[in-house]
Amino acid sequence: MINVQAKPAAVSAVTFEKKETSKIKAEIMRRYFRMVHLLFALLILIQFLPNQLTTETYASYVIWFAAGAEVFTLVMSAFIKKHESLNLFVDIISFIYGILSVWTLATAKFNLLKPALFPPPGKILWQFIGDYDKILINIQSSAGIILKGYLLAISVAIPLGLFFGWSARLGGAATYISKFLGSIPPIVYIPYGIALLPTFRSVSVFVIFLATFWPVFSGTMSGVMNVEKKTIDSAKVLNVGKSTMLFSVILPASLQQIFIGCNQGLTVSFVLLTSAEMIGAQSGLGYYIKNYSDFGDYTRTIVGLIVVGIVIVVISFIFNRIQKFLLRWKQ
């Protein structure tokens, strides 16, 4: 009797162990056996094809960059828990591998594009490393202007938006005024800023302030005026004061609209800052791009364009994380 009872239990344990092993294998396959690794191998193989350019292509820089990206991908594949997040990350890396492969084939390997205008990716990476110090200084300059103008704008726009949005009469008039003034491109104020302000850096901060102020002001007013009536009525039942109503009830309920305005202001700020720096600045990413493009150095011009994109993506990512944290109660 003991052996008869023990046999089904042993079979059940073996079956359970096989299922667990199968799950582990499936998880490993899902995380590590992906198209991105084939694209990595393809990118590396392309670098060993014969070059059609007589100048140095710096293919070793692409190989080292791809190897670093591949190691990073393998590490992140182990640490990212959510499959949706992992898929997004892997898709981005795959896209980078694909762009580098096509770029290398079109430039160094088949010479389909003019080398002076479109240098191979290895030369871009080589130039990036060579100009690392200059790039870092220009990033600091641009980021400092963005932070000053942006933080000053939201610190003024949000309180004013709360005040005007709280009054239906004032809010209605202010909405049309903000639409009128907000529709004027802030970059047209640069000549007045140059005439009135002491330095071009202060002019740039002023332009960023204008670019951020109106979207945040409008978003704040819209959020306040569209707070659900039942939310306000519930707070009135508790006999809360005006300041408590405004900052503890209205403000949290308006955060989603406020963040929409902040996001719009941040996007426009980068565009205007780069444009302003290309006009008369002596530092910043816009200056870096304009300065070298004037001399026909398109290698550094492309480096500047890529750095601008990276900086915008990083700052937008940080902004979105802050937004998710502050709005976590709405999840």
Image (cartoon, rainbow, N blue to C red):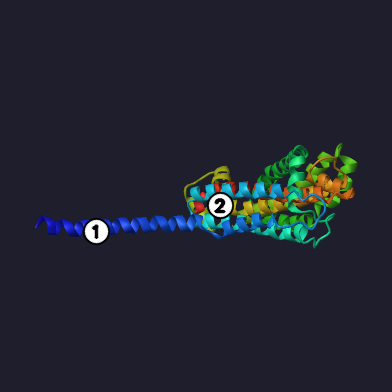
Relative to residue 155, is residue 90 drawn left or right? left
* Three-letter amino acid code at the position of disc 2: Ala
Q: Quadrant of residue 285?
A: top right
Q: Quick one: which residue is furthest to the left in this view?
A: 1
Residue 173 seen in render: yes
Q: Quadrant of the N terminus?
A: bottom left
In depth, the one of 242 and 273 nearer the eye is: 273
Q: Earlier in the sequence, mark 1 or mark 2?
A: 1
| Location of mark 1 (residue) | 12
In depth, the one of 133 and 167 nearer the eye is: 133
Q: Secondary structure at mark 1?
A: helix
Mark 1 Cα-neighbour bin, 10 Å: few <14, some 14–19, many ≥20: few
Residue 164 seen in render: no
* Three-letter amino acid code at the position of disc 1: Ser
**Residue 239 in the image: x percent, y percent?**
49, 46
Question: Could you tell me which residue is drawn at 79 percent across and 53 percent down?
Answer: 119
| Location of mark 2 (residue) | 253
**Residue 63 in the image: x percent, y percent?**
66, 49
Q: Secondary structure at mark 2?
A: helix
**Residue 97 in the image: x percent, y percent?**
65, 56
**Residue 331 in the image: x percent, y percent?**
50, 54
Question: Could you tell me which residue is drawn at 81 percent across and 43 percent down?
Answer: 204
In depth, the one of 173 and 304 nearer the eye is: 304
Mark 2 Cα-neighbour bin, 10 Å: few <14, some 14–19, many ≥20: many
Relative to residue 18, is residue 164 drawn left or right? right
